Image (cartoon, rainbow, N blue to C red):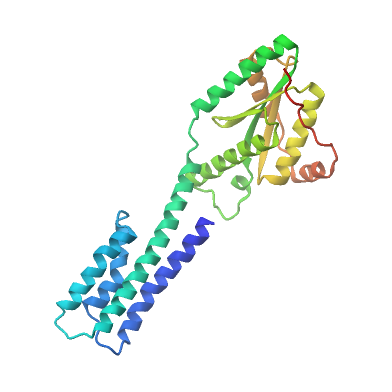
Amino acid sequence: MPMTSFREHIRLWALWTLVMPVLFLANPLGEVGWLELGAVLTPLTMLVERRITRELALAVGLPALTLIWLFSPESAPLAQMFVAWAVFTVGVLLASRAIRSQLEIEAIAGQVAYVPDDAESVEKFRIAVDRELGRARRHDRPFAILSAAAHPRSLEADASGLYRTELLRTLAENRARLELRDFLSGDLHVYSDVAIDGARILALVPEVDVDALELLLERLRNAADETLTFDVQLGASHFPRDAVCAEDLIDVADRNRTTSKLRSLPERIAGRDSDLGVWRSPDVQG
């Protein structure tokens, strides 16, 4: 995990930075001077300025340490310069690893903290619904639209106060939304279109009758309880039972979702124990 790697890397870097001055003080080769201080402290500049890369730090720092050694007023053996080089190089490498891990964490947090309104994906979903609606009317074939929403349990139950800030709350909600989208995409039939539309996830399920839709919803709820770490509200609408146009179908699915009850832990356990069979939508024909 990026967070674990970052903690390990920053711990090693801090330990190295703290231990090296102690070793230099006990160094029998000579007194601690600018050479040793530069070797230990210069890598810290990488924290201040992110644009200082590992390669740039080494390309500038090693010659700079050499110049300090050459113009040092006190006489220092050549081995002392090599030791300073080694200390500086290791410090830079540890710093670059810690910074790289931090950047990975920031990138992941940025992706999860902001789920963009993917207008293209939503538009493709709407086009798919219109296409399926036309096909269903021509061939008298049913289909369904699912509306799902994620509700992280930790937002209410975490006693440590992890989600006290709005940023962490947003991270939890958006991460759950992304996981729910991936869950529906992987669990539904290959012909099903899934898209994030604001706080909800919409899915188009072709070729499903009313009875099969009820089994599908129950199977999805049970699978979500087993694999996801948050609660899921799920609603559906059926063509032609509930509505005969795209917007009305989506509205009905949304209403059914918002009125659906979040199941308690005993209900989730009971759902896992019940054998409802496995439902799969048939292949699209024609």
Report x, y in % for residue 276.
84, 36
Q: Residue furthest top?
A: 138
Report x, y in % for residue 119.
49, 26
Who's the residue at 21% across and 69% down the image? Answer: 64
Q: Residue furthest front?
A: 286
Report x, y in % for residue 109.
48, 47
Q: Is residue 71 rendered to the left or right of residue 149?
A: left
Q: Residue furthest right?
A: 275
Front-lying residue, 114 or 118: 118
Residue 242 image-quadrant placement: top right
Who's the residue at 38% across and 61% down the image? Answer: 96
Quadrant into which the C terminus falls: top right
Q: Is residue 267 rendered to the left or right of residue 228?
A: right
Q: Can you say whether 153 is above or below 185 in the image?
A: below
Q: Can you say whether 220 is above or below 250 in the image?
A: below
Residue 258 image-quadrant placement: top right
Front-lying residue, 138 or 32: 138
Front-lying residue, 261 or 78: 78
